[in-house]
Amino acid sequence: MTASEGGKRRAAILGGSGFTGAELYRLLDRHPEFEVAFVSSESKAGFPVDKYFIGSIHKKKPSSLKFSKAEELDGHYDAIFSCLPTGQLPKIVQRVAQHTNYIFNVSGDYRLSDTELLQKHYPETLQHDYDGSFHYFIPEFCEIDRSAKIVNLPGCMAVATIYTLYPLAAEGLIEPRVITDAKTGSSGGGKSTTEHHAERSQNFRAHKLHGHRHRPEIEHALALHSKQSVDLQFSVFSLDLPRGIMATSYSYLKDGVTAADVKKAFYSAYAGKPFLHYFSSGSSTPMIKTVVGTNIAEIGAYVEGRSCVSIATIDNLLKGAAGQALQAANLYFGYPEEAGLQFNGEGAWP
Amino acid sequence: MTASEGGKRRAAILGGSGFTGAELYRLLDRHPEFEVAFVSSESKAGFPVDKYFIGSIHKKKPSSLKFSKAEELDGHYDAIFSCLPTGQLPKIVQRVAQHTNYIFNVSGDYRLSDTELLQKHYPETLQHDYDGSFHYFIPEFCEIDRSAKIVNLPGCMAVATIYTLYPLAAEGLIEPRVITDAKTGSSGGGKSTTEHHAERSQNFRAHKLHGHRHRPEIEHALALHSKQSVDLQFSVFSLDLPRGIMATSYSYLKDGVTAADVKKAFYSAYAGKPFLHYFSSGSSTPMIKTVVGTNIAEIGAYVEGRSCVSIATIDNLLKGAAGQALQAANLYFGYPEEAGLQFNGEGAWP
Amino acid sequence: MTASEGGKRRAAILGGSGFTGAELYRLLDRHPEFEVAFVSSESKAGFPVDKYFIGSIHKKKPSSLKFSKAEELDGHYDAIFSCLPTGQLPKIVQRVAQHTNYIFNVSGDYRLSDTELLQKHYPETLQHDYDGSFHYFIPEFCEIDRSAKIVNLPGCMAVATIYTLYPLAAEGLIEPRVITDAKTGSSGGGKSTTEHHAERSQNFRAHKLHGHRHRPEIEHALALHSKQSVDLQFSVFSLDLPRGIMATSYSYLKDGVTAADVKKAFYSAYAGKPFLHYFSSGSSTPMIKTVVGTNIAEIGAYVEGRSCVSIATIDNLLKGAAGQALQAANLYFGYPEEAGLQFNGEGAWP
Amino acid sequence: MTASEGGKRRAAILGGSGFTGAELYRLLDRHPEFEVAFVSSESKAGFPVDKYFIGSIHKKKPSSLKFSKAEELDGHYDAIFSCLPTGQLPKIVQRVAQHTNYIFNVSGDYRLSDTELLQKHYPETLQHDYDGSFHYFIPEFCEIDRSAKIVNLPGCMAVATIYTLYPLAAEGLIEPRVITDAKTGSSGGGKSTTEHHAERSQNFRAHKLHGHRHRPEIEHALALHSKQSVDLQFSVFSLDLPRGIMATSYSYLKDGVTAADVKKAFYSAYAGKPFLHYFSSGSSTPMIKTVVGTNIAEIGAYVEGRSCVSIATIDNLLKGAAGQALQAANLYFGYPEEAGLQFNGEGAWP
Amino acid sequence: MASLNCLVCRSDIEVEEQASTGEIVECASCGQEHEVQVESQLVSIALAPEIEETWGE
Amino acid sequence: MASLNCLVCRSDIEVEEQASTGEIVECASCGQEHEVQVESQLVSIALAPEIEETWGE
Ligand SMILES: NC(=O)c1ccc[n+]([C@@H]2O[C@H](COP(=O)([O-])OP(=O)(O)OC[C@H]3O[C@@H](n4cnc5c(N)ncnc54)[C@H](OP(=O)(O)O)[C@@H]3O)[C@@H](O)[C@H]2O)c1
Ligand SMILES: NC(=O)c1ccc[n+]([C@@H]2O[C@H](COP(=O)([O-])OP(=O)(O)OC[C@H]3O[C@@H](n4cnc5c(N)ncnc54)[C@H](OP(=O)(O)O)[C@@H]3O)[C@@H](O)[C@H]2O)c1
Ligand SMILES: NC(=O)c1ccc[n+]([C@@H]2O[C@H](COP(=O)([O-])OP(=O)(O)OC[C@H]3O[C@@H](n4cnc5c(N)ncnc54)[C@H](OP(=O)(O)O)[C@@H]3O)[C@@H](O)[C@H]2O)c1
Ligand SMILES: NC(=O)c1ccc[n+]([C@@H]2O[C@H](COP(=O)([O-])OP(=O)(O)OC[C@H]3O[C@@H](n4cnc5c(N)ncnc54)[C@H](OP(=O)(O)O)[C@@H]3O)[C@@H](O)[C@H]2O)c1
Ligand SMILES: [Zn+2]
Ligand SMILES: [Zn+2]
């Protein structure tokens, strides 16, 4: 790997004018080790990046970097972050791969490997050749695999759900049938939406009750890291909030499993993970408001009898996308896991 | 029963300065057959009712009625609506019962009959003598019992949940283990709350994950009207909305039960009920926004494989309390079920 | 005028799939004297109207009417309500006018008559021939002119502002320089907007500080009905609400004018107007929440020394558009002014 | 001044369990030069501070500090931050002053000096002896006066308004009559409020139209630093937001003053002030969403003809209270003005 | 060094000799926080105070 | 070093010889941003692009 002049690593962002791309730009821009040298947007090509991002209005020295079309990508980058809509990266991946060491991809393109599921949920992935290798990577559970060029991050609702179930599945504590009722804010759908503010505002409604493509991802990820498989009912609801996800999972403990076993499983799985805050003691429960604007996942598990309710909350654009991708890049490049991901705003209340 | 002069029935409201009391006052005030002759409030006693209610600012002829203390209740009323905090009516019920034909009670006091459960959830009910009879009454499912003086309405989250499960349980279509994830707006807690607007705003969080007292009520109500009993995991969450409840229930169909069976069960249970709008066809799902300000419950059931997700939404202050009580009174007095409960505002969007 | 069979008047709605069109459809559908016989939409042509409107989900008997393209308009209508985007009606007005007695237009096309201002703000009006006459009509202030085929309703922010200033200007009580700070919900911009929910949510920001086209309309309307002209600074801000407008006007009383003079002016102007609720006494001030879902304008004026703050709130889609148009139609056809415009939901709180 | 062991300065917070106190605790806790050694609360005395603050849930090492009653204050502190309700500090100021070098006070007690105004707005200040001196301090405009023991910070709405008017008044560019329409979130009223979430939610309403005690403060502060005095109409409105203030001021430019003069005045007053972001170029306008969670004031001025609209937005708990107090303390103790006040979350969007 | 048991999962918890009342010790297996109580040399533990939430309802 | 005038307040703005097209220079009196344009050695300035907002309405 070659670091750029000034010692900083060169990063590119594809789909940099969208919600997750904007967050990545903001994070990389303050990161001690990266410098953003290329940002793609088809519709804004030629426009100065720092004049477009609301997130840059408080910057004292706006950069002179301008958006380029994705096809203008040239030269070598230590890391390329892809924030394109799902289905776009596969179309250009062969070419993009030649310009970088790693592609950190927040889209869904390379999360599944089963051909049938790919055909159903991510057909573009199958339709376009890619002769390199890829790796599904959740920073807290997966091994770093430096041989894979594409490091594919998890889905935002998928990963929140996985945080609620991983210790239970890994230790084989629960019966297979599990239900997750997930709620999400409106930025989860990206900047192009047909849903009007006036329609979403003052409402709470179902988004997708059956057939969400994060379901096979969750089942697959848990199977990989677990003693047992789960049979998941996964339903998603829409909140009148710009950001944030809560995943609430309902499971039944196997005969003989106690509340203390559950506590031990969560604590041993999550203690020491810098961004996973497991509420080990008592009455606190995860909330959306205290994770928004942070890379933190709040996690809790609450047992009564054999019934276990486990909850995780995250910011979909940070821990669910841009923050997660940067956390992965930190690990891949050997930087402190928390580099560029500590926000002093954490803890503002109310 | 004696009708008052002018032919209208005399109604009293206990706890009339609270959220549900204010709604009842508003509804009764426009009802063709009732006239409100007494409204109790301990803290506002002596203050003109129409000067206190925001809901009366657009009234052209404010009434001269003033709040009285509950102990000042005197004379005879055709109906007394009790909107006191749970635990208060039992203290005065012996006296109140002498002044009326029926007490329509929106509090929890007379919803359960099991002594152990009463002791746990409604201890005041046991502590005070009451030698009359009472009746738990859901307008759509329960027989009118004119021998009971207390007509106790269901809990707001309980009834929304019951609407999601009744057809499934009544027809014995599901396995016993059921999960309900319920979400509620902030008026559900009544006017005295210690939760600050700034804390609830822009948040979504758990309210009570285990041990909610609506759980035994739901289990009991379903058992009464069903071929099967359910074992319910019931968890409640707080929305940043003033009004509205969504109850989402997750169940597994028994072997051999089909999506069509579920449709038939819901349709036959709910078709023709004036306030239960079952979405029999297609893609519509219940929302909070379209039921707020109405006495309507939107209900849907969505099956994939053996997994059934059934949803109901209501306005907690109307179909969950004041509207439900008036609907009950309409039935008890032989008026049209919808009298005073049709709001031309229904359908405003967005 | 010919009434249709069944005695109801035939109405058509142009631009019926938008926010104001949907409200008009809802209102006319319940109106005792009108029946909707034609609803235009370019994008939904052929789709059943009652399957499209969220506002119709609770209707027991959906109508079989389908959307048509505007060019399919045929036959005769007692009233045509135009809810097209501003600039569209002038293109087809010659043809549309042949099919009806009156066009009630909620767009801005025929609000101004000054050529220079038209050129700046409504150029389409000048570009297309129209050989009939038109009339700017505020139900509370303007004479009915049955000779005009186009009855053009006021702008939503314009009319809220006019309600705050009319009595002051009409009586010549204030110095000419006036400031209006208006705040609006998101449905004010219609269904096609590029503003994402996630961007508007949790924000308050300026929408247009100078140069809003409602300013000349307000100045013009006040001049018509007043002893004095005003020189208005008019700025508009965006609320995180789906519906509702508050206009707050700041003026200085002329030397010698007292708080009592202001009270008298407002009271004499507004008492008896069914939809204008002037808070004549005391501490109540207009709010958005209590007018949403109604055709009511809440109005108050608060004087200290020579400084006068006058406020009006309305629902932009009702009193600001569809309700106002129906109120006008009621007056033009000699029906009770409130027909079809009383919502029993008025007064729901909180 | 004596620094504590470990080199950090000892700080105390009075009224530390309230909204501004909690923010100060959060900020001081991360500040490189201060350590919090005492936090008062009457109602929580004895309870561990880090178990009370939601803002501390993500802290890895909770402190063992407990709340104490204010009367238990003992020993010496480099700085005492008073976040008591207005009217409380004067009762104990003589004693508190003995324990510290400076009292940074966010309440209103020592903002005015005119006896008549004090009597009207801050009577407690007059009723209790205090033989030391005090100083009204806006970090950007006021000289540091180390002889004053009480450094009184400005009111939150006052300071936002002052930011909109200072350059105009200082340069004598405007006519005296000025109007400010200010909007505020709900945390501005502190943790003890009688306003229910359900009432504030989905509303926008007037809070105080005349007679707000920030008005004399603004007039006084401008007079001190200006060539001219202003005659202010100051009205405040309530937003359905937890945090944030927008002050919008309307003024008329004196004859001959141009838009460029206004730009120059704002730019020369604010360029280089680390927390004042003046939008010198064009179309950007201050918003609430982008200042929440920061110590930044966004400021803009927009001229058309002789009409000037100037706007400032701040976070009421940070730039309006706790952040402002810490900024003042940084200046008094010679630390970098931005120490402890840079939040990497700045710029998150949407 | 007092050897006590976690009040939730029964695992051993070591509390240092010089621990003082009010100190918080976490169980190393399940994370439960305990508050140390020292009374006339005798060390014991109780569940630590929880975050206090005043949510109403 | 080209000497130009602010397009808003007329104050002098100095643009360095080696400035290249697209560079942003601020007016020192009023803060207005300008974008440098170099064409065949000739330096000029235009108002810089504004933050692009797509608020709708
Ligand atoms: N939003 C979330 O919370 C979240 C969380 C986890 C993962 N993700 C995933 O992250 C990806 C990006 O999401 P987002 O929310 O940032 O979406 P977004 O806001 O819609 O942004 C998409 C970006 O891709 C560009 N783009 C759009 N169409 C393109 C095309 N045909 N070819 C090339 N570029 C194109 C857009 O730029 P122009 O329109 O300017 O060309 C924009 O920069 C998606 O795959 C999404 O599933 C999102
Ligand atoms: N809110 C809902 O959505 C909902 C739904 C279904 C059922 N319910 C049930 O309905 C009942 C009322 O709820 P709410 O939300 O209307 O409550 P609320 O807003 O708190 O009103 C309570 C009423 O009772 C009065 N009151 C309070 N304490 C009293 C006492 N010790 N003795 C006599 N009167 C007293 C209050 O008047 P003063 O304070 O002026 O004396 C007020 O009028 C509760 O039992 C609740 O569980 C509520
Ligand atoms: N929203 C308010 O609060 C409000 C208040 C007062 C006045 N107004 C005015 O009322 C008018 C309508 O506003 P709105 O909010 O209802 O707008 P909207 O939601 O955008 O609806 C516009 C309607 O016009 C149709 N339409 C769009 N483009 C068209 C074209 N080129 N030719 C023919 N039909 C077309 C649309 O149907 P398809 O797209 O399906 O073809 C839709 O039915 C505007 O002039 C607005 O200024 C609005
Ligand atoms: N909120 C804002 O945005 C803002 C902005 C600028 C300035 N301010 C000013 O800052 C001050 C504090 O505001 P806040 O919003 O933080 O208020 P708050 O949330 O009500 O907190 C007040 C604090 O004072 C304590 N307290 C209450 N009554 C007391 C008494 N009689 N004696 C001693 N302590 C008492 C409270 O603790 P216990 O109840 O636990 O005893 C609490 O710690 C006020 O003067 C306010 O005007 C506030
Ligand atoms: Zn343990
Ligand atoms: Zn300049």
Image: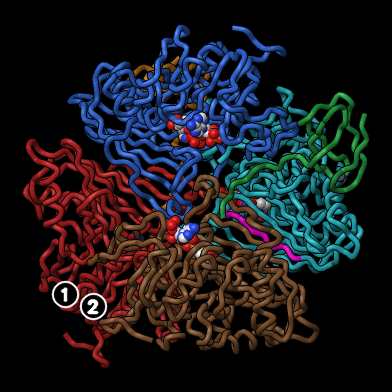
Chain colours: A cyan, B brown, C red, D blue, E green, F orange
**Residue C47 visible to an observer of this rendering:** no
In this rendered view, identify the residue nearer to me: C67 or D325. Answer: D325
Q: Which residue matches tag 1? A: C332
Q: Which circle's residue, 1 or 2, is located before the other in the chain?
A: 2
- Mark 1, Cα crowd under 10 Å, few <14 / some 14-19 / many 20+, is some
Where A125 sits versus D87, above or below? Answer: below
Where residue C191 appears, as percent x and y from the top left, is 42, 62
Magenta stretch contains residue E28: no
Quadrant location of the N terminus of chain B in the rendered image: bottom left
Which span is picked out in magenta?
A179-186
- Residue at 74% x, 79% y is B229
- Secondary structure mostly seen in magenta is strand
Mark 1: C-beta under 8 Å from nearest atom of ligand 3: no
**Residue E22 visible to an observer of this rendering:** yes
In this rendered view, identify the residue nearer to me: B21 or A29. Answer: B21
Q: Amino acid at mark 1?
A: Tyr
Chain letter of disc 2 in the image = C
Q: Which residue matches tag 2? A: C79
Q: Is residue A164 left or right of residue A246?
A: right
Where residue E25 appears, as percent x and y from the top left, is 82, 35
Where residue A171 appears, as percent x and y from the top left, is 90, 55
Q: Are marks 1 and 2 in contact (CB under 8 Å)?
A: yes
